[in-house]
Amino acid sequence: MTGLHHLTAVSSHIRENYQFYTKVMGMRLVKRSVNQDDVSAYHLFYSGDRRGVPGNDFTFFDWDVPKKQRGGNSIIRTYLRVNGKNALSWWADWLREHGIKHDGISELDGRASILFVDPEGQRLALVDDGGHGDPHEAWARSSVQAANQIRGLGPIMLSVPDLRPTDLLLTKTLNMRQARHYAHPEGGIVHVYEMGPGGPHAELHVAEQTDLPPERLGAGGVHHVAFRTPNEEEYHEWIRRIQSFRIPNSGEVDRHWFRSLYFREPNGILFEIATDGPGFAVDEDTETLGEKVVLPPFLEPQRSEIVANLKPID
């Protein structure tokens, strides 16, 4: 695996969610579709890159559910990358202007960061990536100027009560490497796992926190995290590898814009391995991404019924 592919969270206020991530966070809605397993719900893909390339996508399921109950056995924070402390200083002011509380810039794992939550309680952070990661293409219509725009996903943080089984899966099955560790500000030790070239766009941070009850997933929670694999050949190798370890899994799933494989790590957190291609431009022009509801071919015969049941978000 070469890094992070996307992360999928849950929202019960999808119109407000759309306003926050496009207007406040300056991200582009690059794919407006539906949950392929529950077509009554939107699946919205926001990107820090105008092309919506893998490694940038922060996605949401639109489910009418109660707020999550925080706890362990879960994904507890999503980092979004920006370039440089000047960008972080700008964001500190911008977030306050929009009523988003935070404690300013602090250093965590040797990187300058701002910790905050979105209006539904989704725990987020902005982190200085030092210019690392894939080349970023700014979106000209963003509410945020190009120099300060979000450059993609940064580290994803999990909380587990017992590191050992998770460590075995990450290192022995998924070929990640444990690079270092640091103290979590709320207690426990965070272990940093690298994939591919490493760097903030290719890290999983696992906090071992033994005293937390399991999280109850809901609005403001994270459904799963996806890791990148560059092509279908390596994707099929991953399917064979996961099956060789007798890990229960979804088998091959065609999401039209990428191919997926789903399975749970030993503490119950849902993982996905997804291909880089074909990509979002396979059925839309890059300049008009996200402007209309796009369905995978197998759902097109149901378009009228599906679209009629979706809320307007613009």
Image: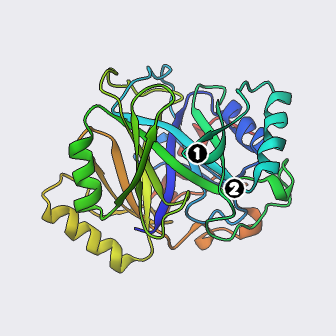
Residue at screen point 84% across, 49% down: 144
Q: Which mark is residue 48?
A: 2
Cβ–Cβ under 8 Å for marks 2 and 1: no
Residue type at the position of mark 1: Tyr
Position of 162 relative to 44 (above/below): above
Determine the secondary structure under disc 2. Answer: loop
Q: Is residue 191 left or right of residue 128?
A: left
Name the image quarter holding residue 298: bottom left
Pinpoint residue 18: horizontal percent, then vertical percent.
70, 39
Position of 65 relative to 279 (above/below): above
The residue tagged 1 is 79
Label 1: how many residues lie within 10 Å, few (<14), some (14-19) or many (20+)?
Answer: many
Residue at screen point 48% across, 70% down: 197
Q: Measure the C-alpha gap from mark 2 to mark 1.
A: 12 Å
Quadrant including the N terminus: bottom left
- Counting residues from the start of the chain, the first of labels 2 and 1 encountered is 2
Q: Foreground: 272 or 255?
A: 272
Q: Which mark is residue 64?
A: none
Residue at screen point 74% across, 67% down: 137
Label 2: how many residues lie within 10 Å, few (<14), some (14-19) or many (20+)?
Answer: many
Quadrant including the C terminus: top right
